[in-house]
Image (cartoon, rainbow, N blue to C red):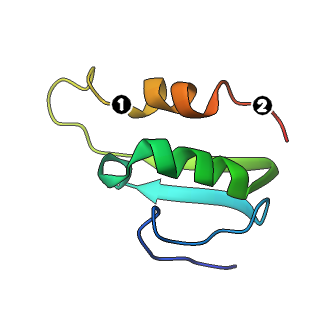
């Protein structure tokens, strides 16, 4: 297993090099216009991107689902 700990916007990730990516209570810090396409490129065909978060109060303004579609389109198998 390879573990990378760094700011997503700064780290260099090879294309199709990861089976999975995990972001635990962190995506709200990421510039999604940079981070989501980078993760999409880094995942192998059939790879998984797992995100979890804590929500306090109204979560309707949480940006990841809508911005993910805007930056990466609908999920497509590689």
Can you tell which quarter of the image residue 21 is in?
A: bottom right
**Residue located 45% across and 62% down the image:** 9
Distance between mark 1 and mark 2 Cα atoms: 20 Å
The N terminus, quarter of image: bottom right
The C terminus, quarter of image: top right
Residue 72, horizontal then vertical, whole percent = 62, 33
Q: Is residue 20 left or right of residue 46?
A: left
Can you tell which quarter of the image residue 17 is in?
A: bottom right
**Residue located 46% across and 69% down the image:** 10
Residue 8 visible, this angle: yes
Q: Is residue 57 left or right of residue 2?
A: left
Give the total number of marks visible in the rendering.
2
Farthest residue to the top: give it.
60
> Of helix, strand and loop, which one carries label 1?
loop
Q: Earlier in the sequence, mark 1 or mark 2?
A: 1
> Of helix, strand and loop, which one carries label 2?
loop
* 34 or 67, nearer to the observer: 34
Q: Is residue 37 left or right of residue 55?
A: right
Residue 54, horizontal then vertical, whole percent = 27, 44
Do residues under tags 1 and 2 come within 8 Å of each other at their CB atoms?
Answer: no
Q: How packed is label 1: few (under 14 Cα within 10 Å), some, or many (20 or more)? A: few
Q: Where 8 sits versus 77, above or below?
A: below
Q: How packed is label 2: few (under 14 Cα within 10 Å), some, or many (20 or more)? A: few
Residue 25 visible, this angle: no
* 48 or 73, nearer to the observer: 73
Q: Which residue is mark 2?
A: 76
**Residue located 14% across and 28% down the image:** 57
Q: Which residue is mark 1?
A: 63
Can you tell which quarter of the image residue 19 is in?
A: bottom right
Q: Where 55 sits versus 51, above or below?
A: above
Residue 32, horizontal then vertical, whole percent = 43, 43
């Amino acid at each position: 297993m390879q573990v990378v700990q760094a700011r997503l916007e700064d780290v260099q990730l090879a294309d199709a090099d990861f089976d999975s990516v995990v972001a635990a209570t962190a995506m709200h810090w990421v510039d999604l216009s940079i981070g989501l396409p980078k993760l999409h490129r880094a995942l192998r065909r059939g790879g998984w991107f797992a995100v979890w978060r804590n929500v306090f109060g109204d979560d309707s303004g949480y940006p990841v689902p809508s911005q993910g579609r805007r930056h990466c389109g609908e999920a497509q198998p590689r």
